Image: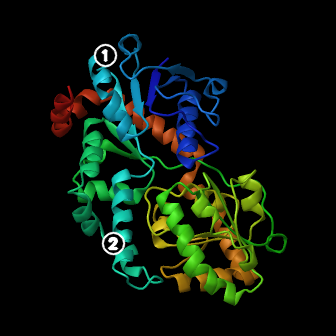
């Protein structure tokens, strides 16, 4: 039985964040494929920690320098759940488990996320039109490269990608950026998005009401989206639909987030939703006015899974849409987003077309069985050809030597 060892700084929290759900999906794929899976972390177990043992995963709480633990491992594959985990544990893996295939999981490139946040912050400081972000959303791959390349965070993250035998990416846009912008060979990369299925049933237009938005209030990108929504988008939308109500739910609500609560204006800033599926399945339109970020926005994908049409920005849609019709409307200005949301909310025929596009998009892009099968096949291929691949990944060999 092949053995997968997962090394992480934290325990997965699938109910709290989409990255935790994605990691759990990957673990379940390996378990279903007949692998033995061990999850090891130096973090203390938290309240929302997934019950990995119930899935059949062996849980190990370790010290970062636990020589005895690493010396006892005979893993065929090591999965790092972030590039910082790779930095932290790579020397131990090199010393004690050199034969293991080294795989890095990204939940969106952190360096891309930081760069987009900086570009947004710079634009806000310049005092340009607070409603129009077309130029920001249209930032090209070469421009992103020029902004990212000098960053220490980018250099660290790319070094980890080169040192690994394979990196799993959730967004094809990031795949293209790494290949065409940074010259990473495509044989070091694998597209592995969230693995989900459309909800079995969903409510019709007449049984749904209100706008909804979900996120983590501790996330810089999510908090910025909340501010843009509150100060620029919602006032315009509210003038078009005076009775409209917007419910914002999220984990880690802070005092500054809750201060935006304005029920008299139809805007309700709430804490974490008791049941995300019920909340999204009863909403008529989902709003995701993201101006920065990377990877795939989990709550946005959850909304599509429930058949809820979405109004969002090009940045948020890039990792989800591909070449398929968007189930809702994509706009790049606050006025455009507000107009689109009002139109979609009140037009039953347009809403139905968007609703009907949700299932096919989820099936075409995020099919659970297909992506799980392809992932295991790619891992098996990499295991067979690992030595040959490492021979030609000379940059990775140099960087691994430097880490010793």
Residue 347: image x %, image y %?
73, 84
Q: Taking 326 as reference, is 179 above or below it?
A: above
- Residue 382 appearing in the image: no
User: Residue at 46% of width from left, 26% of height from top?
Assistant: 42
Residue 86: image x %, image y %?
34, 34
Image depth: mark 2 or mark 1 in front: 2
Q: Earlier in the sequence, mark 2 or mark 1?
A: 1
Q: Circle 2 sits on which residue? A: 122
Q: Taking 307 as reference, is 88 above or below it?
A: above
- Residue 85 appearing in the image: yes
Residue 122: image x %, image y %?
33, 72
Q: Circle 1 sits on which residue? A: 96
Q: Is residue 158 left or right of residue 266?
A: left
Mark 2 lies on a secondary structure that is helix
User: Residue at 42% of width from left, 79% of height from top?
Assistant: 133
In the image shown, does 229 or 158 lie closer to the viewer?
Answer: 229
Mark 1 lies on a secondary structure that is helix
Residue 199: image x %, image y %?
72, 54
Q: How many marks?
A: 2
Which quadrant holds residue 402?
top left
């Amino acid at each position: 039985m092949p053995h997968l060892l997962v090394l992480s700084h934290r325990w997965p929290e699938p109910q709290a964040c989409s990255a935790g759900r994605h990691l759990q999906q990957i673990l379940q794929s390996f378990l279903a494929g007949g692998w033995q899976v061990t999850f090891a972390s130096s973090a203390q177990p938290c309240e929302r920690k997934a019950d990995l043992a119930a899935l059949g995963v062996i849980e190990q709480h370790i010290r970062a320098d636990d020589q005895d633990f690493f010396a006892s491992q005979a893993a065929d594959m090591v999965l790092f759940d972030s590039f910082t985990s790779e930095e932290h544990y790579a020397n131990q893996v090199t010393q004690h488990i050199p034969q293991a295939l080294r795989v890095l999981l990204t939940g969106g490139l952190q360096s891309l996320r930081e760069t987009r946040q900086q570009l947004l912050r710079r634009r806000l400081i310049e005092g340009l039109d607070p409603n129009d972000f077309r130029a920001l959303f249209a930032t090209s791959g070469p421009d992103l490269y020029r902004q990212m390349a000098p960053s220490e965070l980018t250099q660290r993250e790319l070094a980890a990608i080169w040192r690994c035998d394979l990196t799993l990416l959730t967004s094809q846009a990031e795949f293209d950026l790494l290949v065409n912008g940074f010259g990473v060979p495509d044989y070091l990369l694998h597209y592995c998005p969230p693995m989900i299925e459309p909800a079995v049933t969903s409510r019709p237009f007449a049984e749904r009401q209100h706008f909804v938005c979900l996120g983590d209030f501790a996330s810089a990108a999510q908090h910025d989206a909340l501010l843009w929504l509150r100060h620029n988008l919602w006032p315009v939308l509210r003038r078009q639909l005076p009775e409209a109500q917007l419910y914002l739910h999220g984990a880690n609500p802070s005092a500054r987030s809750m201060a935006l609560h304005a029920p008299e204006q139809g805007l309700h800033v709430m804490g974490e939703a008791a049941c995300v599926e019920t909340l999204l399945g009863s909403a008529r339109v989902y709003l995701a006015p993201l101006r920065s970020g990377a990877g795939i926005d989990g709550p946005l994908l959850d909304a599509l899974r429930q058949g809820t049409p979405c109004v969002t920005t090009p940045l948020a849609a890039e990792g989800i849409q591909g070449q398929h019709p968007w189930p809702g409307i994509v706009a790049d200005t606050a006025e455009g987003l507000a107009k689109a949301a009002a139109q979609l909310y009140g037009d039953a025929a347009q809403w139905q077309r968007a609703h009907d596009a949700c299932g096919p998009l989820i099936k075409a892009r995020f099919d659970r069985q297909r992506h799980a099968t392809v992932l295991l096949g790619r891992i098996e291929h990499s295991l067979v050809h690992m030595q040959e691949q490492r021979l030609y990944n000379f940059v990775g060999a140099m960087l691994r030597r430097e880490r010793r």
